[in-house]
Each structure stands twice: as structure tokens, then as C-alpha cells.
Amino acid sequence: MSIQSWKINLAEWLLLKVKYPSEFHFGAAKEKQGQTAARKKIILTLLPSHDNLGDHAIAYASKTFLEREYPDFDIIEVDMKDIYRSAKALIKKRHPEDMVFIIGGGNMGDLYRYEEWTRRFIIKTFHQYKIVQLPATAHFSDTKKGRKELKRAKKVYNAHPELLLMARDETTYQWMKRHFPGKTVLKQPDMVLYLDKSEQHVPREGIFLCLREDRESALTDDERNRVKAALTEEFGELHSFTTTVGRRISRRTREKELEALWDTLKGAEAVVTDRLHGMIFCALTKTPCVVIRTFDHKVMEGYQWLKSIPHMTFIERPEPETVAAAVNRLLASETGEGGFSHSVYFEGLREKISGDAN
């Protein structure tokens, strides 16, 4: 029985471990007596199981990056909710070169505490592993709760002997260097920008809108309605999309869900959004995009990676007339569709992670 080429998730591994206890070791060939166990592995964890396509795109892009850049490793994906019960089994089958990669995103801080607590569990539990935190945005509020969470985070992060941190914006980069002075900190864009989804060309029609209605929005309900009214008056019927789809998404369904949304955006004349991944998905699909700020620095600084794209513009104060005028400028522009080359920022990243970069 040869299973060396299998790429499976942890649940499948546990089932196969029961069925083939003497043969199955995390996708490696059968262990020979007297030899060290298993092929070397990368454990990719903190994966989401909720409905936010932005987070699932990060997970999908992170796995794509690891499979391409680390072909000599088996990639083991472990959902955020599964890591607690799976950690012991993973450590038991450790190869000396195994590493842990934690997906990035905007959940470092006290805004999404379960994700932050799980990250700390991973860092504490896998103390003997090299751990790589992929590009993240940090936000600890200046409150009693926020300061308490930051104190705990500093204690855990700083205690790990081989933790590498990546920031996806300048504010987080400076924050990480200040609070974790002994750690290597890299500045890298969101992992979704590693992907390329611009190959398909379809006719573009209609203005699409994707605006937040949660605690990260900088718009009041009235301001949001006024923007919608101004765009409707100027361009007629608007088309809406969202990156939170209202149903749970798994690793088995995420690619299908993402491809469906990317196909939709490829057919849009222009998009107005205040979602980071609404903006990033437009960059991937070469879709003209008007970007509106959110309550913190996440979107504004995420835009800094993309500001050279000719069909993307950022609005700090989204007055309705300003937004409509920005869309008109993009539609009237004679500049060719803009894109983003992941090689600009991701080339040589493996060497940076290993510390071999010049």
C-alpha cells in the first residue's frame, strides 16, 4: 500500500490511522523498523470554518503557497477548532524539520478573542517547532480588556524560541517590532495576493457594491444609504455581493465558493467596497475598484500594496458625490486594466522564512 503522495486533512488521517495503524503516518510511506518516522511536514493551522470568504481565501492562498514553495514537505491542514484535540497526535509524530504555519488575517488582537486565544495555544503547545505567523493585522484596543490581552500575548509570543512574525501593513509591522523586539518580523502583503485569477476575460457590465454593516465599518447606516442612493441615481440598478455568505464553508467547499465570486467580479464594470478582500479580489481579477476606508488602518494600509494599479482608487471621506465621481473616473479611464504580480512581493519568501535571504 503506497500513500506517500496523499494530501489529506487531519480528520481523514485519524480515520485511516484507525484502519491502517501500522502503515499510515501523516501521508508518508510505511515507516521501516529502525528508521525515523514520517516525512517532514508543515502544519497549516488556525483555518476558519465560518462564512467569511476573505479568511477562506487566505487559507486557500496559504496552502497554495506552501505546496508550490515547499514541495519537499507534506502539508497538513488543521482547522482552528480541531487544533486543541489534534496537537498531541501531531507532536507525537514529529519529524525534526516539521514546522507550524499560522494563517494570517485581521484576527490578531482582542476584537476576535477566540482566534487570538487559539493562536496563543498553538504557540505555547508547539514550543519546540519553528512557527511562522503569515501576514496579519494586529489590533489591541486601548481598553482594560485590550491591554490585558496584549500583556498575555507578549508573554506567550516572546517566550517562543523560534517564532517568525509577518505583518501585512506598516502599522502592524512597527507594532510587532516594538512589542516583540527579539523576534524576526517581515512585512508582506496579504497571502491572497499570491494568487492569480485574471486569466479569464468576460464582458463587464454593471456597478457592484460590497459594504460592511458590522463593527469594522466606518460608515453609519445613514451614510451607507446615501452612498447607495447616489450610485443608483448615477448608474441605475446596483448589483450587490458579499464576502460573508451566511453559511459555513469548509476546506472541501471553499475553492468552489471563491471561484464563483471571482467569476462574478470578472464581469463587473466597477466595484465599490470597504472590505479588504473585496479590494484584494478586485486586484486579482483586474476589476476597477473604489475603496472606502474602515474603522482602523487595515483597508487603508492594505491599499498601499495596490495603489500603483491604475484602476483602483482609495477614498478617505466617502461623501456620496465623491464616490460616484470616483466610479465615473475609473469607467472613463483609458488606462489598461491593472493587475498585481505576486512575484514582486513573494519571490524569495521561503529563503526569508529560513533566514537564508541576503
Image (cartoon, rainbow, N blue to C red):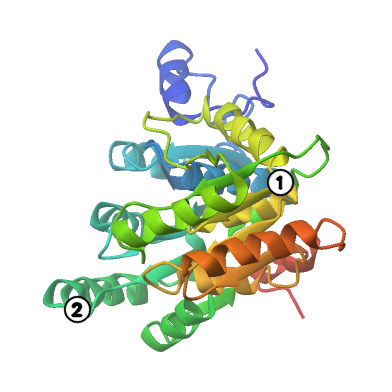
Residue 216 as seen in the image, left or right of residue 28: left
Name the residue that disc number 2 marks.
147
Of mark 2 and mark 1, the one earlier in the sequence is 2
The percent coordinates of residue 130 (x first, y second) are 50, 62
- Mark 2 to mark 1: distance in Å? 44 Å
Q: Are marks 2 and 1 in contact (CB under 8 Å)?
A: no
Residue 238 as seen in the image, left or right of residue 313: left
Q: Comparing marks 2 and 1, which lies closer to the viewer?
A: 1
Q: Amino acid at mark 2?
A: Arg
Q: Amino acid at mark 1?
A: Glu
Front position in the image: 11 or 301: 301
The percent coordinates of residue 168 (x first, y second) are 54, 69
**Residue 162 visible to an observer of this rendering:** no
Say which mark, if any, is on residue 269. 1
In the displayed structure, would residue 228 be above or below residue 180? above
The quadrant holding residue 29 is top right
The percent coordinates of residue 307 (x first, y second) are 69, 72
Counting other residues with Cα less than 10 Å from the Cα at mark 1, is it few (<14), some (14-19), or many (20 or more)? some
Q: Give the residue at x 43% y 87%.
A: 181
**Residue 332 visible to an observer of this rendering:** yes
Q: Give the residue at x 55% y 70%.
A: 322
| Quarter placement of the N terminus | top right
Q: Secondary structure at mark 1?
A: loop
In the displayed structure, would residue 179 be above or below residue 157? below
Q: Secondary structure at mark 2?
A: helix
The percent coordinates of residue 197 (x first, y second) are 74, 43
| Quarter placement of the C terminus | bottom right
